[in-house]
Structures are given as structure tokens and as C-alpha cells.
């Protein structure tokens, strides 16, 4: 059973230090009726809120280019037991060209979870959803498979969002997946996404307030 942490406590803390050890998964929480993403250490359950960039590494396993990190880890008590979380792919797969992620990848990527599959579209557009069920404790911990559909080394960018009935959809989140390049290059690519695709904290707070206000008016 995962440790219970209330959403109120999570969002009232200005910031958490990212853990130096342990793998960071994606967590989803709500504030003001809007979904947000954060990072969670699966060993300690320490959450860093308002994180939108995540990392993973592909491995070639029997000819399949495969990754199962980051997972999705939501603490018990976060949502209604038996409810569903929806994951959508927002854009075509991008590839790092050494300086940015403006280039379309020469292949696509497929997410698999049980019998469900989602493949990145050839042109930008919402694709999904992939559905994850909250357990009897109102949390979940699932690891969909990320499969690169061609054996082409590179660093790839997947853009996603999360949705749930009754809540405002999350802002975009990005997963930067490395296949066969140096970790230094991987970190440079992650830093580029953080600098160029994620808005400044002040802009994020203002936007979250507008989203909550828009939801109340609907």
C-alpha cells in the first residue's frame, strides 16, 4: 500500500528537493479542480509538484526497443476508488537534432498497457485515451511500455496530457527517452525542454488560476 499524502498538503509546500537516489515516476494530483503532474520517488514516495519533464531510457531486448520508465504512481487517497485516469498523446514523436526538438522523428512510438495501445500520430493531433483504473485505495502504480518502432539511435520527445472526468485536463508533460546516446546528451536534451517548452513558474500559476476559473464558469 502506498503512503497517503493529502493533495492539500502537497500543494501548500512551496517546493520539494528532488531525491538524489531512486527512480522518479510521474504522479498526478488535483488543485482547484484541475489536474497537475509532479515527480514521485517510488522508493520514498516523496513528491515534487509541478514537474512536467520526465526521463527514460530505451533498451534493445531481443530486437524490441523498449522502456518501462517512467511509470505512473499516484498515492492512495488521491482520487475516488474505481475512477479512471486518461492519458492522451498530444503530438507526433520528435527527435533531438543536437540543439532542439523541432525535428520529426523518422519512426513512431507505441505505448502498450495490457490490451491497450497508442501510437504517436504522423501529424500533430490528440491521440487516445489510454485508460488507467484507480484501485480500491484511490491510487495507482502502473508502468506502460514505451516501444520505439525502429532501431534508430537517438533521443526522443513524447508529449502527453492527463484527463479525468470532473477535472480540468493537465497541462502538457514531456518524456525524454534516450536510445543509445551519451547520458550527457540526454541531460542537455532534458534541459532544452525545461527551458523552452515549460513556462516560468509565475506563468504556470497564473494559467492554473485561469483554468480553474474557466472550469467554475462552465
Image (spheres, rainbow, N blue to C red):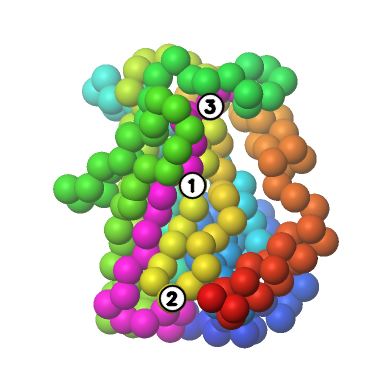
Task: State the separation of the CA atoms marked 1 and 2.
Answer: 19 Å
Say whether residue 171 is magenta: no
Say whether residue 90 is magenta: yes
Main SS category, magenta section: loop
Give the position of the N terminus as an image quadrant. bottom left
Residue 181, position as x, y percentages in the image:
56, 20
**Labels 3 and 1: the sequence-earlier one:** 3
Q: Nearer the viewer, mark 2 or mark 3?
A: 2
Residue 103, position as x, y percentages in the image:
58, 19
Q: Is residue 210 above or below residue 130?
A: below
Task: State the separation of the CA atoms marked 2 and 3.
Answer: 31 Å
Q: Secondary structure at mark 1?
A: strand
Viewer-nearest residue: 201 or 22: 201
Callout 2–callout 3 Cβ contact below 8 Å: no
Callout 1–callout 2 Cβ contact below 8 Å: no
**Residue stretch in magenta:** 77-96
Within 10 Å of the Cα at label 3, are there few (<14), some (14-19), or many (20+) other Cα atoms?
A: many
Residue 147, position as x, y percentages in the image:
34, 32
Callout 3–callout 1 Cβ contact below 8 Å: no
**What residue would you read off at disc 2?**
166
Name the residue at 71% across, 71% down. 209
Give the position of the C terminus as an image quadrant. bottom right
Name the residue at 33% across, 35% down. 119
Name the residue at 33% across, 52% down. 129
Viewer-nearest residue: 77 or 128: 128
Name the residue at 79% across, 58% down. 203
**What residue would you read off at disc 1?**
160
**What residue would you read off at disc 3?**
94
Whether residue 107 is visible? yes
**Labels 1 and 2: the sequence-earlier one:** 1
Amino acid at each position: 500500500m502506498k503512503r497517503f499524502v493529502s493533495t492539500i498538503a502537497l500543494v501548500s509546500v512551496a517546493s520539494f528537493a528532488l531525491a538524489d537516489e531512486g527512480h522518479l515516476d510521474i504522479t498526478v494530483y488535483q488543485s482547484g479542480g484541475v489536474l497537475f503532474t509532479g515527480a514521485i520517488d517510488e522508493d520514498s514516495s516523496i513528491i515534487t509538484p509541478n514537474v512536467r519533464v520526465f526521463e527514460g531510457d530505451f533498451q534493445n531486448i531481443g530486437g524490441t526497443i523498449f522502456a518501462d520508465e517512467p511509470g505512473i504512481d499516484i498515492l492512495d487517497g488521491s482520487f475516488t476508488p474505481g475512477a479512471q485516469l486518461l492519458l492522451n498523446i498530444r503530438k507526433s514523436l520528435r527527435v533531438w537534432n543536437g540543439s532542439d526538438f523541432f525535428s520529426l522523428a523518422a519512426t513512431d512510438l507505441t505505448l502498450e498497457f495490457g490490451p491497450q495501445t497508442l501510437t504517436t500520430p504522423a501529424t500533430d493531433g490528440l491521440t487516445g485515451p489510454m485508460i488507467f483504473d484507480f484501485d480500491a485505495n484511490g491510487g495507482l502504480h502502473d508502468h506502460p511500455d514505451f516501444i520505439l518502432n525502429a532501431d534508430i539511435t537517438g533521443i526522443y520527445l513524447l508529449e502527453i496530457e492527463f484527463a479525468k472526468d470532473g477535472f480540468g485536463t493537465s497541462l502538457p508533460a514531456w518524456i525524454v527517452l534516450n536510445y543509445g546516446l551519451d547520458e550527457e546528451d540526454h541531460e542537455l536534451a532534458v534541459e532544452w525542454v525545461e527551458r523552452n517548452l515549460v513556462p516560468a513558474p509565475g506563468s504556470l500559476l497564473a494559467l492554473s488560476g485561469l483554468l480553474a476559473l474557466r472550469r467554475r464558469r462552465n
